[in-house]
Every structure is written in C-alpha cells, then in structure tokens.
Amino acid sequence: MYGTRYDVEHEITVTAGATQALFTAVTACVRPGDEVIVFEPVYDSYAPAIELAGGTVVRLQLAAPDYRPDWAAVAAAITARTRMIMINTPHNPTATVWTADDLDRLAALVRDTAIVVVADEVYEHIVFDGATHASCARHPELAARSFVVSSFGKTYHITGWKVGYILAPRELMAEFRKVHQFNVFTVNTPVQLALADYMSEPARHTGLAAFYQAKRDFFRDALADTRFELLPSRGTYFQLARFGAISTLPDTAFCEYLTRDIGVAAIPLSAFFADGRDERVVRFCFAKTEATLAAAGERLRRV
Ligand code: PMP
C-alpha cells in the first residue's frame, strides 16, 4: 500500500487492537528518565503508557483552529533524553491530517538522533477531499525508525473486536516482541482467521474515505442551522464544534447537558488536555447511520 516491503516474519506483529500496539511499543522503548514528545490535544492512551514506563511526557500544543504542529517548538523540545515522538494522523480528536511535508520536517529533526517515532495511523483510510494519507511507512527515512500502528477496528467497522497490527524495522520489532511475548503472546486466532478470510478479497478498505466523507457532509449539513461553529474535518470520523455562542457552561458540563437533556453524546475537548484546558469545543462522532445523524441534527437545532 505504501511502497515499503515489511518482512512478515520479523517486521509485522498482529496486536490486540492499536491500543496494545501503542502500549507495547512504549513499554519496549521507554525507560525511567526518558522523554516522550506528544502533541496536545492528545489521544488518551499515550500518556498513561509513557508514565507507567517511567517516562516523562513532553506536551507540545496544536493550536486551534488548524491544529498544525509548530516545528520550531518540536525542535526546541528535543533534548538528549528524548527517546520517542508519538504522532497521530489523521488525528483524533481534531480531525486534522498531516502532509508529506510534515513528515519531511519530522524526519529532518530526528535525523542523527536515536529517537524512535510511533505513528498512530489508525484512521489511515479515512482522509477527505482527495487528500492522501501521509504514512511513515511511505517515508523511507522515517520507516527505518518508526513503529506504524493500524487498527482493523477502524478500517472494517469493528471497533471492539480489538485487532490491529504494528509495523517496524526488524531491530525495533525484536524489542517489541520481547514485551508482546509475555503480555499477549498471541491475539485470538478465530478473529484473525475471520479477518484473513474477509481480506482475501483485495482492497476491502477502498471506498472507506468516500463512505465517511458522505457522513461528514451529511452531519455538517444537519448542523448548519444550529449555533455550533464547525471546525474543519479533514479525516477520521470526528467533527469538532465550538459552542461559545450557545452556552457559558464549561465544556464537560455542556457535554453532560447535551447527553442528559438533549440526547446527543459528545466529548469535551478538555479531556484531551493534561491541564483540562477548556477551549469551549466539543467532539462529535459521525460514524453513525444517516437516520441517527439526522435525529442528532434535529435535537441539536433545539440547543
Ligand atoms: N489510536 C487512536 C487515535 C484511536 O482513536 C483509537 C480508537 N479510539 C485507538 C488508537 C485504539 O484502537 P483499537 O480499538 O484498535 O485499540
């Protein structure tokens, strides 16, 4: 898919979801005192994995409304103790997508260091408006130092089945498997066989971007007459919305209100910041049927 050949025996490991892949990669590489750079708002499983390994989480900010990385800040954050940089594109929760140029910038910064990259690419097939997913697996220089994480849960609509896989060059994967061996050993075979059977038809994932882009457009249309201010959604199945024109409640209380009184669940963006910062933004998920999205739009027009 990305033009890089990974050796099946030594460079690909099936995991109990992306969550285990991320946790095991961190556990294999991070030791007390090591620093790991993450980008906030950040997916919630990274920091606990780093902290359990004794590492220090170094948080760099992605600023609204574009949530783009600040490469000067990344350069300034790299120290002799930096062991790992964790990236996520397409990005949960902001629905931004990195470009090939972003990967070049990252590659230039980690060149001549021992920094390992963990690339969480679970939404790799869900990029919109004709954009191409920039995979570390497609970038030879980064591929040589990266763990690349994928999830069948996202790609085949089976969240909860918890099967994914991780790619890495042989030396990194050897370290990964030292942890995997005594934590998971193997991912349950019946589900692996079911997935292998399903994948025997080639390119099962094609159409996924169009499928979710239609849902994104449907949901954005459904919210057009509300007082929410919609931020761009360039990938994933998430939609950020500002609610400052609707309520003065903190984002968490506003989400409780939406859930209890309006009947639409959303996640407060503050949940993705270590300091609980409230930017008055909520995250909706549009991986739903059109009927559900229409009903949500109906209810949110009353807010
Ligand atoms: N990374 C990100 C960015 C995610 O959004 C998710 C799922 N919410 C995961 C990892 C975990 O994927 P899995 O279900 O395969 O463990």
Image (tube, rainbow, N blue to C red):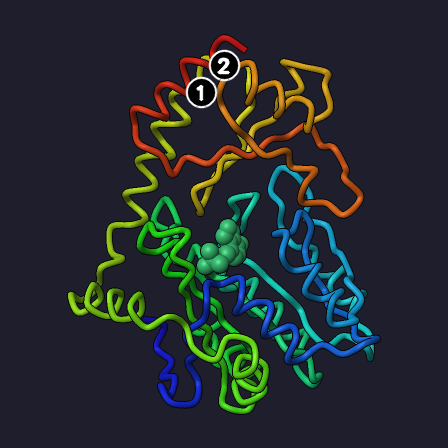
Residue 160 coordinates in the image, percent (x, y): 41, 52
Say which residue appears at 55% left-offset and 91% top-offset. 171
Amino acid at circle 1: Leu
Asked if the residue at tag 1 contacts the one at tag 2, i.e. Cβ–Cβ closer than 8 Å, the answer is yes
Say which residue appears at 31% left-offset and 70% top-offset. 192
Element carrying mark 1: loop
User: On the picture, is 65 further left or further right than 47?
Assistant: left
Residue located beneath label 1 in the image: 223
- Name the image quarter holding residue 28: bottom right
In the image, residue 28 sits, relative to residue 152, either above or below, namely below
Residue 39 coordinates in the image, percent (x, y): 68, 55
Which dot marks residue 226? 2
Residue 1 visible in this rendered orientation of the protein: yes
Residue 262 coordinates in the image, percent (x, y): 52, 15
The response on whether ligand 1 sits within 8 Å of label 1 is: no
Q: Residues within 10 Å of mark 2 (few under 14, many from 20)?
A: some
Residue 244 coordinates in the image, percent (x, y): 67, 19
In the image, residue 194 sits, relative to residue 11, either above or below, namely above
Say which residue appears at 60% left-offset and 31% top-offset. 282
Amino acid at circle 2: Thr
- Name the image quarter holding residue 246: top right
